[in-house]
């Protein structure tokens, strides 16, 4: 059986569609979607419509849980601060049908595929927002003890890896929407036919087309700073949103500004101007 593993789309419909069609051209039998389909863009409905119509198993990531949490208990910060404008846009852009679909998804699944036991989770079954890297051996040991699967599949890190440990296989397929381990955009194909084989697939995409796609959207108008950081990542394969947030934290500490609740808009804007100039 040939299985496509796609994670961390982050509303990047153009690259996702190309990857999905690429997987179909390779005659995959099944898709596994590992979360973070939404936010950081504006075409999540198109992405979720494709996922829902495919032969697949899907789970939620941290971004889906954030939208579900906001749906249940509105966060006043999302209405007030630029820092959260992208998340608010992501929530408001989803239609009711897809919101309900996300709310129906679990955060992990244990699957029996072609005689192999496979665990899929965005981060881990214990914590959807945790970190699992290629050498997280303590986490691997706990997963083996609790679930005893043959293969464990992860997203969240936006960095791909393949690790064999204690006769088990641990895979992160990377991000098809916002890779932070260099370009190109990535997904994976897992083949199970007695043995287990894995292939990392790279998807190249014209940056100028991506830039035009985002900059001509209402999303860019509403969340310009965050969208600009995303485009920097799509161009370079570096984690500019995280680098920027680290820069803001350092600047806030130097200026003795409390950002524990939210980043004041003035600090957010000035930090972006400084960060952008440093990067260019």
Image: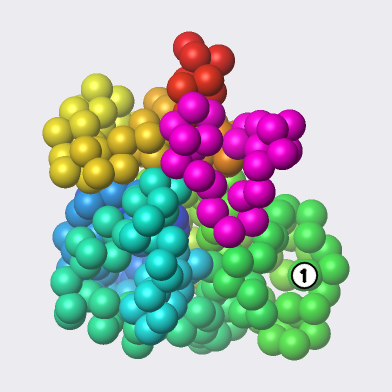
Q: Position of residue 32 (x, y in %)?
A: 41, 69
Q: Is residue 200 magenta?
A: no
**128 versus 263 height, above or below:** below
- Tell me residue 41's x, y (percent): 29, 49
Q: Secondary structure at mark 1?
A: helix
Instruction: Give left or right: position of 77 versus 159.
Output: left
Q: Quadrant of residue 131?
A: bottom right
Residue at x 20% of width, y 61% of height: 93
Nearest the viewer among 241 and 14 is 241
Q: Nearer the viewer, residue 86 or 230?
A: 86
Highlighted range, magenta? 247-271
Residue 82 position, x and y percent, is 39, 46
Q: How many residues crowd mark 1 within 10 Å: few (<14), some (14–19), many (20+)?
A: many
Residue at the image position 66 percent from the left and 38 percent from the top: 252
| Picture layout, residue 262 above or below residue 140 | above
Rendered view: 82 above or below 279: below
Q: Is residue 51 visible?
A: yes
Task: Name the residue at 79% across, 54% down.
Answer: 135
Q: Main secondary structure of the magenta part?
A: helix
Residue at the spot of label 1:
140
- Residue 251 on the magenta segment: yes
Q: How is the image coloured?
A: rainbow
């Amino acid at each position: 059986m040939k299985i496509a593993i796609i994670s961390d789309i982050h509303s990047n419909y153009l690259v996702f569609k190309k990857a999905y069609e690429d997987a179909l051209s390779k005659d995959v039998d099944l898709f596994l979607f590992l979360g973070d389909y939404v936010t950081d863009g504006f075409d999540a409905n198109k992405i979720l419509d494709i996922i829902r119509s495919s032969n697949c198993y899907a789970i939620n990531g941290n971004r889906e849980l954030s939208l579900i949490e906001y749906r249940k208990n509105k966060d006043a910060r999302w209405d007030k601060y630029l820092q959260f404008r992208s998340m608010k846009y992501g929530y408001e852009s989803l239609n009711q049908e897809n919101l309900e679909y996300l709310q129906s998804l679990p955060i992990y699944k244990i699957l029996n595929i072609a005689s192999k036991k496979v665990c899929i989770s965005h981060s881990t079954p214990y914590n959807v927002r945790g970190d699992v890297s290629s050498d997280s051996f303590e986490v691997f040991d706990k997963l083996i003890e609790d679930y005893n699967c043959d293969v464990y599949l992860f997203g969240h890190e936006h960095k791909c890896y393949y690790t064999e440990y204690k006769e088990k296989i641990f895979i992160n397929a990377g991000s098809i929407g916002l890779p932070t381990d260099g370009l190109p955009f990535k997904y994976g194909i897992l083949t199970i036919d007695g043995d287990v084989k894995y292939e990392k697939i790279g998807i190249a995409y014209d940056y100028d087309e991506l830039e035009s796609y985002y900059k001509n959207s209402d999303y860019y108008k509403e969340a310009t700073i965050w969208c600009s950081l995303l485009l920097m990542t799509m161009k370079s394969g570096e984690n500019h949103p995280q680098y920027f947030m680290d820069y803001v934290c350092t600047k806030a500490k130097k200026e003795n500004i409390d950002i524990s609740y939210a980043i004041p808009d003035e600090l957010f804007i000035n930090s972006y101007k400084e960060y952008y100039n440093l990067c260019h």
